[in-house]
Amino acid sequence: MLKWILTLVVAIFLLGIIGPHLARFIRFGKLPGDFAFRFRGRSYTFPVATTIIFSLLLWLLSRVI
């Protein structure tokens, strides 16, 4: 159990560092079906379509491996 928690923490840490740099090239969060709005000077994004596509890709990858 401890190994899984440690792996999850490391993965979230790496995604937090790499994510913003990757966002410029992949442009995730900009697909049709992704909701973005501004409220009181802050922008909020709900990447629904992007999440579904990434989930399908990870599912297909897990089925192949």
Image (cartoon, rainbow, N blue to C red):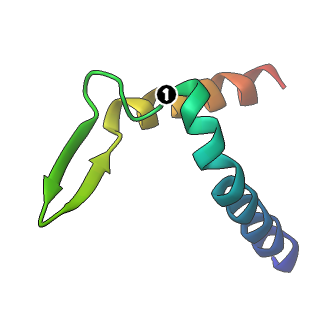
Q: Is residue 43 above or below residue 49?
A: below
Residue that appears at 68% across and 53% down = 15
The residue positioned farthest toward the front in the image shown = 41
Name the quarter where the C terminus is drawn.
Answer: top right
Image position, residue 7 (x, y; %): 82, 65
Question: Disc 1 marks which amino acid?
Answer: Arg
In the rendered image, residue 59, in percent from the top left (x then y), is placed at: 62, 30
Using the image as rendered, state which of residue 32 and residue 58 is in the foreground: 32
Q: Quadrant of the N terminus?
A: bottom right
Residue under label 1, please give it: 27
Disc 1 secondary structure class = loop
Q: Dividing the picture into quarters, in which one does residue 14 lie?
A: bottom right
Residue 43 x, y percent position in the rendering: 25, 55
Report the residue at 82% width, 73% height from top: 6
Vertical relation: 53 (above or below) 45 = above
Horizontally, residue 52 falls left or right of residue 36, namely right
